[in-house]
Image (cartoon, rainbow, N blue to C red):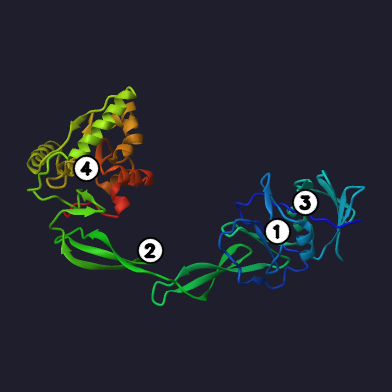
Amino acid sequence: MKRTKFAAAFGALAFVWMLHPNPAVAAIEPIIFENLDNLPADHIRIVLDGQEIPMETKPQIIDGRTYVPLRAVSEGMGLMVEWNEASRTITATNEESTILLTLDSKEAMVNAQAVALDAPLCILDGRVLAPLRFLQENLGYRVVWNGEARLILMSRQDIGEWRYSYFEMTEPYREVEALYINGEKTARIRFNGKYHDAEVAWRLEGYEGTYPFREYERKYIGDVKTPETRYTGTNRTQMVSIQGILIANKTYSLPEAYAPGEHPAAREAFNIMQADAQAAGLSIYVASGYRDYRLQTLIYNRNSALYGQSRTDTFSARPGHSEHQTGMAFDLNTISGSFGKSKEGEWVRDNGHRYGFIIRYPEGKEQLTGYQYEPWHIRYLGIEMATKVYESGLCLEEYFGIPSAYAS
C-alpha cells in the first residue's frame, strides 16, 4: 500500500456551519484561535486547533463544495491514511475510528457501519478528493467558515476567535475586537493593542430649520459619523450649492433677484435626450421650464386660493423655493401621475441620467423631498452626478443628507 492525498468538501460557503458537539468534549472550554490573518485571501485556508495547516495543493471549490488535501487534514486530525490501488480504496484510522472510502462511491464504512456521503470521492490532478462534511460528522469536529477571510476553522472543542469590530470614537482611537464562539458574536470585547489611523473631518450637514437658519457641520472620524455638530458661523442668507449642485427645496431658497434664465447646458442635454427618444419612437417635450421669482409667486398664490396652502405645499413651491428658478428643471409632457406609467415616462426614468437628468421627486420619497411624486419633473445635474444619484436609488435630499421643510 502507499499513502496519497485527497481533499474534502463541505457544502456551500455562504454560511457558518457548526456541527453538534461530541458529548465527550462538550464540557471542555473553547479553544481560542489567536493571531488569525483575517484579511481577504485569494485561496481557502484551514486552521485546525489554532494552527494553519500547510498544504501544497490549495483547497478548491468543485460543484459548490470545497475540497482540501486529505494527507494534510488527516494528519492534523490524527488519522493515518493508506491507499489500496487494487481495490481503489482509502483507509483512514485513529484510535477511535476506522473509515473505509471507495472511489466513485457515495457510501463509506465507519467502524463497519455504512454511512452515506454527500459527495463521492474523486481524483483531481492525480490526487484523491473526499467530502470534508463526512469526516467532520464522523470525527466530531466543529467547523466555522469565515467567508470574508476565506478561513475554515476546525476543532473538536468550541471555537473562539477574536475579530475586529470597531474603533473607539475618542482619542487615541483604540481598535476593539469582539469574541466569536462557533461563529456567533458575543458581548465580550477587548483592546487589540492597535490604534486606528482616524482622520477627523468636519462636513457640511445642512441648515437649522428655524430662523436664522444657521449652517452647521458634523464631525466625522475616519469616515464614521459622530453625534457632534458645530455652527459654521454663517446663516442661510445666500444660495447653497453642494458638490457643485445648486439646491432649491423647502429648506434652501433662492433670492428674489436671482434670475439666470434657462440654463444652456440643461437645454442642450434635453435636446439630445429628446432626439434619442424620438429615434426610439417616443415623444417628449418641455411643458414648463424656467420660471422667475415673480412668476412662481403668481402660480403659488393662485394654487393656494384654489386648494388652500397646506395642500398646495405638497405640489407647488413657494416663491424662492422652486427648482424652476434655477433654470435647470423641466416639467415634461403631461403634468399628471399617468406620465410615469407611459412609455415616455418609463424611458425618461430609466435613461434620463445618461443625459444628466434625474426624476427630482421620486415615488416613495415624499416625506424626504416634501413634494408628491412627480414623474414629469426632471432636474439637470450633469451626467456624472445624475448617474451617481440614479444608481444610489436615493432622492437628492437623501444623497446629500439635507432636509426639505419650510420653517413655518
Image side of residue 406 versus residue 194, left or right: left
Q: Secondary structure at mark 1?
A: loop
Say which label, 2 or 3, has the lower sequence index: 3
- Mark 3 residue type: Ala
Give the farthest residue toward the top: 281
Amino acid under disc 1: Leu
Q: Position of residue 304 (x, y in %)?
A: 12, 40
Query: In the shown orientation, is residue 381 left or right of residue 10?
Result: left
Q: Secondary structure at mark 2?
A: loop
Indicate the position of residue 253 as horizontal and vertical percent values. Answer: 15, 51
| Res 137 label | none
Please name the residue that numbered disc 1 is placed on.
Answer: 19
Left or right for 394, reference 114: left
Location of mark 4 (residue): 314
Q: Which residue is mark 2?
A: 223
Residue 134: % across, % down: 77, 53
Depth order, front residue of 194/32: 194
Figure check: 376 above or below 40: above
- The amino acid marked with disc number 4 is Thr
Q: Nearer the viewer, mark 3 or mark 4?
A: 3
- For image coordinates 7% across by 48% down, the residue present is 257
